[in-house]
Amino acid sequence: MRIAIFGTGGAGGYFGAQLALAGEDVVFIARGEHLQAIREHGLRLETANDNFVVHAPATDNPREAGLVDAVLLGVKTWQVHDAAQIMQPLIADNTFVVPLQNGVEAAEQLAAELGPEHVLGGLCGTISWLAGPGQIRSVGQTHFIKFAELDNTPSDRVESLRRAFAAAGVNVEVPANIQKAVWAKFVFGAAFGGVGAFKRQPAGAIRTNSESRRMLEDSMREILAVAQARNVSLPEDTIKKSLALIDGLDPGATTSLQRDLAAGKPSELEGWTGAVVRLGREANVATPLNELIYQSLLPGELRARASQQ
């Protein structure tokens, strides 16, 4: 398959590198110093066990990249709309896009711009980030990707991409219901990201403190209620499984939301905790804890965005 990695940050860089190392025809879409470093030296992937350098085409111009079979979208949640417009030169009649964002709205946003026939539902898990130009750093052993057709029907294109990831040694799954899978990940990610940023502590400190652990559970309950109101019924053990995932993380693990806010950078607050509050209001579901977290973090988010203007 010919696969474009649109947004070669932590998630896109990690999974794109794995595909390229396995021999897939990968092209990286990046920009600035990061793009220049990839072109000159390759994309370096640093893991706990080894370092790899991937040499593959890279550009900031989708028209230069040309048509592809699939696009892995690794941009931030607030960039999805613009990315959908910019990636048009990559899209052939049979091209499909897999969103890797942590929120629950990316597939709908992409479908509105590209048409639902060009979009899969998708999610991923990896603690990876851009450590410097041309350099992706990854920690821990939690790396997975899941995707499926929006109507959850089997398809040849989903199976082709699944085989590509499997051949690359990536933990890959085609869920029976992609909407439930995306929301289950959201329960884990939005709660961990919001509470972690609010408490300014990593996974190890949050999960072992009774107060912050209770906050995690309460945040998850609110997100579950919002999902239920939107006709997404998640299993009763979703919270238990989400807490188990946090318990299994490296003690120093944090989310990109927490890292960006701590660094004074624009973050995905609106697409994570903000989405819980906004979607809850639309469904008449109260989300007081997530509202508190959102309102507490919002001033820092607004300062970061103002500094970028």
Image (cartoon, grey):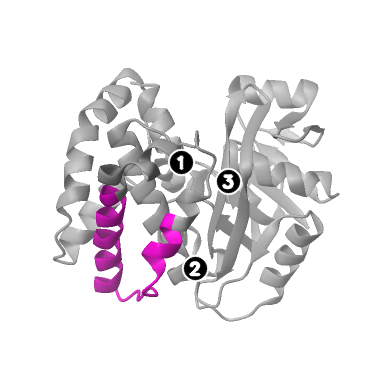
Vertical placement of residue 164 versus 206, above or below:
below
Residue at image mark 3: 126
Which amino acid type corresponds to the residue marked 2 in the rendered image? Pro
Residue at image mark 2: 116
Residue contact at pointers 3 and 2, CB within 8 angstroms:
no
Is residue 264 one of those drawn in magenta? no
Between the C-alphas of marks 3 and 2, the distance is: 26 Å
What quarter of the picture does the N terminus occupy? bottom right
Mark 1 / mark 3, whichever is N-terminal: 1
Vertical placement of residue 191 versus 222, above or below:
above
When asked about the image quadrant of residue 10, the answer is: top right
Residue at image mark 1: 76
* Residue 205: percent from left, percent from top: 39, 36
Instruction: Please give the name of the residue rendered at 35% of the width and 76% of the height, measured from the top-left corner.
Output: 233
Can you tell which of label 1 and label 3 is closer to the viewer?
Answer: 3
Chain part drawn in magenta: 214-243
Mark 3 / mark 2, whichever is N-terminal: 2
